[in-house]
């Protein structure tokens, strides 16, 4: 069995364990686990609890949800932009759609095809060289089924390994989500910007949710501005890019100042105004046959860095840096509490015992020239991680 297949099998075992075994075992593992909010699921290692309730739930920390009128206005504006680009864009494609093979980008691609059949779409996959084989298979199947033109950009393996290794060893206060994942997401977007600018594509569609747009990109709208797109990327997560990348590697990153305003593509986030529940998107991609049942889990369809990010966060911070985002979605009624409670409890258990995630951790560490000992991770080739 190949190393990739071993890693995939291990992650699927983790998913099975979380869904079928953990609901029982968690009662016998309480001493290993942090106390968690009984309303969302945030742990006491992240926030104080009063009678089992976190400060965010006590303060009713709910975002101001746009009114139906606001959502309709944004949707009408987006619709106008699509109609105008169909009418006016003379180049080969009207939009570039960032396509990862996960549930959100799969849903978005189907949405665009259903609502704008005349739109010429180029689906772009940026392969960070750590992509899940399930995601790659999903991409191939969906592209063949839809007939959409597709491009894969794969940066140099050495560059990607250097970037992620540096990020894991230079975490900021936001942990892996604010460092490792931030590098990953920003690079994807910048490669898309460069591709769109060179091909004369005016818009880039991205499947980030409303909460991700607000909390990761710090935008309160569904689009970037041409002024924002005129900036040059000089740092990510507070780290100057020149500390990591050579002059040649810097070409992956976006420099809007090199392009006249009319040639700068805008990033658009349709899920911002659609504001859909996570469970609805899951059910839709399964109903439409866009993803094999069970493979909509991000542990399976994202990339092989995810397990390592979760374990490193748990060890260094006492919680996963992705927990605040999903806990907030639970408070908003847009995600299932039990699903994410069990996910992060199982991850905490794995981090503290060294069990469940062995090959999926060790293969990534090897590629990044990092060690379990260096990152404080239990287990190993001959340890309980196996």
Image (cartoon, rainbow, N blue to C red):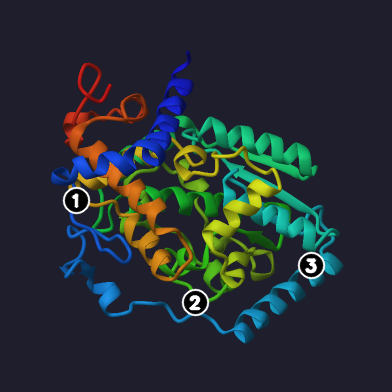
Out of 225 and 216, give the one closest to the viewer: 216
Question: Where is mark 1, residue-wise?
Answer: 318
Secondary structure under the numbered disc 1 in the rendered image? loop
- Relative image position of residue 53 (x, y in whole percent): 23, 69
* Residue at 57% over, 37% down: 135
Out of 152 and 56, give the one closest to the viewer: 56
| Label 3 Cα neighbours within 10 Å, binned few <14 / some 14-19 / many ≥20 | some
- Find residue 200 and report its image quarter: bottom right
- Find residue 363 and report its image quarter: top left
Q: Give the foreground label among 1 and 3.
A: 1
Q: Give the foreground label among 2 and 1.
A: 1
| Label 1 Cα neighbours within 10 Å, binned few <14 / some 14-19 / many ≥20 | some
Q: Height in image: 312 above or below 212?
A: above
Q: Is residue 14 visible?
A: yes
Q: Height in image: 118 above or below 7?
A: below
For this orientation, the residue located farthest to the top is 1
- Relative image position of residue 322 (x, y in whole percent): 35, 54
Secondary structure under the numbered disc 3 in the rendered image? helix
- Asked whether, in this view, residue 77 is left or right of residue 186, the answer is right
For this orientation, the residue located farthest to the left is 31
Secondary structure under the numbered disc 2 in the rendered image? loop
* Disc nearer the start of the sequence (2/3): 3
Q: Is residue 169 visible?
A: no
Question: Where is mark 2, residue-wise?
Answer: 220
- Find residue 91 and report its image quarter: bottom right
* Residue at 78% over, 54% down: 93
Question: Where is mark 3, residue-wise?
Answer: 85
Determine contact: label 2, label 3, CB under 8 Å.
no
* Disc nearer the start of the sequence (1/3): 3
Out of 370 and 296, give the one closest to the viewer: 296
Separation of marks 2 and 3 at Cα, in angstroms:
23 Å
Out of 204 and 27, give the one closest to the viewer: 27
């Amino acid at each position: 069995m190949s190393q990739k297949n071993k890693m995939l099998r291990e992650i699927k075992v983790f998913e099975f364990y979380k869904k079928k075994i953990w609901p029982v075992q968690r009662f016998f593992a309480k001493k290993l686990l942090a106390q968690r909010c009984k309303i969302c699921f945030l742990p006491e290692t992240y926030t104080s609890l009063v009678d089992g309730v976190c400060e965010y739930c006590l303060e009713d920390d709910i975002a101001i949800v746009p009114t139906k009128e606001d959502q309709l206005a944004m949707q009408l504006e987006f619709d106008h932009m699509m109609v105008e680009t169909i009418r006016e864009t003379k180049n080969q494609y009207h939009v570039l759609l960032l396509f990862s093979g996960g549930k959100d980008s799969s849903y978005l691609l189907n949405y665009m095809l259903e609502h704008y059949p005349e739109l010429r779409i180029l689906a772009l996959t940026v392969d960070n060289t750590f992509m899940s084989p399930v995601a790659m298979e999903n991409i191939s199947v969906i592209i063949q089924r839809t007939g959409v033109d597709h491009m894969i950009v794969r940066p140099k393996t050495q560059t990607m390994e250097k970037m992620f290794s540096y990020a894991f060893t230079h975490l900021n206060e936001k942990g892996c989500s604010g460092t490792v994942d931030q590098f990953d997401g920003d690079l994807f977007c910048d490669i898309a910007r460069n591709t769109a600018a060179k091909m004369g594509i005016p818009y880039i569609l991205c499947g980030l949710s409303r909460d991700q747009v607000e909390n990761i990109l710090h935008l309160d709208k569904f689009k970037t501005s041409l002024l924002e797109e005129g900036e040059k990327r000089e740092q990510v997560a507070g780290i100057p890019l020149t500390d990591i990348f050579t002059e040649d590697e810097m070409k992956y990153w976006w420099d809007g100042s090199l392009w006249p305003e009319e040639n700068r593509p805008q990033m658009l986030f349709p899920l911002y105004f659609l504001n859909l529940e996570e469970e609805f998107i899951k059910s839709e991609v399964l109903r439409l046959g866009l993803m094999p049942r069970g493979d909509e889990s991000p542990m399976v369809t994202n990339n092989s860095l995810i397990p390592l990010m979760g374990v490193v966060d748990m060890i260094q911070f006492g919680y996963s840096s992705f927990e605040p985002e999903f806990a907030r979605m639970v408070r908003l009624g847009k995600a299932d509490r039990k699903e994410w409670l069990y996910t992060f409890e199982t991850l905490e258990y794995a981090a503290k015992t060294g069990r469940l995630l062995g090959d999926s951790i060790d293969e990534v560490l090897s590629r990044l020239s990092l060690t379990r000992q260096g990152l404080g991770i239990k287990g190993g080739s001959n340890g309980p991680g196996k």
